[in-house]
Amino acid sequence: MWSRKTAQQWWLGESSARTGIMARGQQKIQAQQKNAKKQAEKKKHGNDQKAAAKAALVFTCPVCRTQMPDPKTFKQHFESKHPKSPMPPELVDVQA
Ligand SMILES: [Zn+2]
């Protein structure tokens, strides 16, 4: 038979262990939420066409709206279809 005191000590020990686990779980959740928030922030600030294209692996021609999977194709497309249009800055350095 447990004395009242022993039972209380057991309960306190058990509950603090549980609190410890819960605190750790909570931290993990908070970290995940923080991460999700960061990702959302990134998306929000991803108005940069270059970054967006990189993320989607799609380049959209600003002249005719054709989508291309890579900068090489984009540059070749731009040079052949829109030779009179100014080349987008992200294409200038691309080796076509
Ligand atoms: Zn085009």
Image: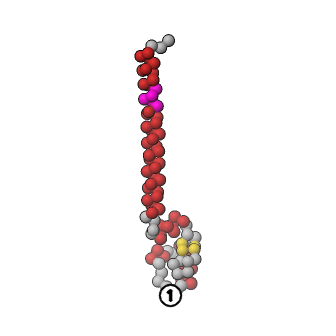
Which percent across, then down, holds residue 14?
Answer: 46, 26
Residue at x 47% of width, y 14% of height: 2
Q: Is residue 48 left or right of residue 76?
A: left
Q: Residue at x 46, y 74 (%)?
A: 90
Determine the residue positioned at 54% across, 72% down. 59
Please name the amino acid that badge 1 sits on.
Lys
For disc 1, the marked residue is: 84
Give the main secondary structure, helix, strand or loop, of the magenta stretch: helix
Q: Quadrant of residue 11?
A: top left
Q: Is residue 73 visible?
A: no
Disc 1 element: loop
Residue 1 within the segment the image draws in magenta: no
Residue 90 visible? The answer is yes
User: Relative to residue 92, is residue 32 depicted above or below?
Assistant: above
Nearest to the observer: residue 17 or residue 92: 17
Direction bottom: furthest residue: 84
Q: Is residue 53 or residue 79 the one in the foreground?
A: 53
Q: Which residues are magenta?
A: 14-18
